[in-house]
Amino acid sequence: MPKYQFTVEVLPQYLPEQSDPTQAVYSFAYTVTVQNTGDTTAQLIARHWTISDANGHIEEVKGLGVVGHQPLLKPGDSFQYSSGCRLRTGTGAMRGSYFCVAEDGERFEAPIPTFVLDATGNHLPPANHTLH
């Protein structure tokens, strides 16, 4: 078992009731589950997201924690949160990383591979990723 490992599941969802395509406003929610599948307790300290739309517009979002929390995850523990974003187009993508610190002081980044935001109804199944 790896010493530092998170498994992340992301489930994106289009929010038609909060969107207005005539004004180029497309709202999305996403639920993220982070599980410590390593053998060392670690804390999620910060996040960095890159959000892109179909027109090539890119927005970077950085900040401490996730939705106001900096969860400390023991091996086997998980933390789930929901957040959202708005795009100017009906499709886009997000990717990012978490900055973490293990209880032994080791700092590491957990990359979050790209997932698709899609208002067209062509929804993909949840993306399951093992992060190191």
Image: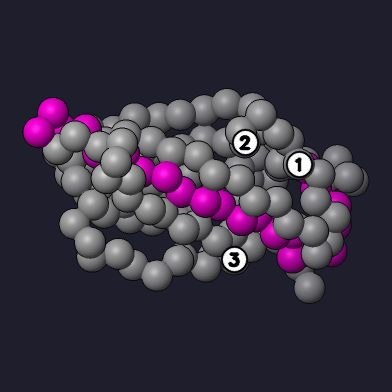
Residue 132 vertical placement versus 56 (above, below): below
Please state if 29 lies on the left or on the right of 123 as rendered.
Answer: right
Please state if 14 lies on the left or on the right of 110 as rendered.
Answer: left
Residue bounds of the magenta highlight: 22-43
* Mark 3, residue position: 130
Residue at position x 33%, y 45% from top?
15
Residue 84, percent from left and from top: 43, 38
Residue 41, percent from left and from top: 85, 52
Earlier in the chain: of badge 3 and badge 1, it is 1
Residue at position x 57%, y 26% from top?
63
Q: Is residue 120 magenta?
A: no
Query: Mark 3 packing: few (<14 Cα in 10 Å), some, or many (20+)?
Result: some
* Mark 1, residue position: 71
* Pick the front one: 83 or 127: 83
* Mark 2, residue position: 66
Marks 1 and 2: in contact by CB < 8 Å? yes
- Please tell me whether mark 3 sits on a helix, a strand or a loop: strand
Cα–Cα span, label 3 and label 2: 19 Å
Residue 40: image quadrant is bottom right
* Pick the front one: 61 or 104: 61
Disc marking residue 14: none
Residue at position x 48%, y 44% from top?
96
Q: Quadrant of the C terminus?
A: bottom right
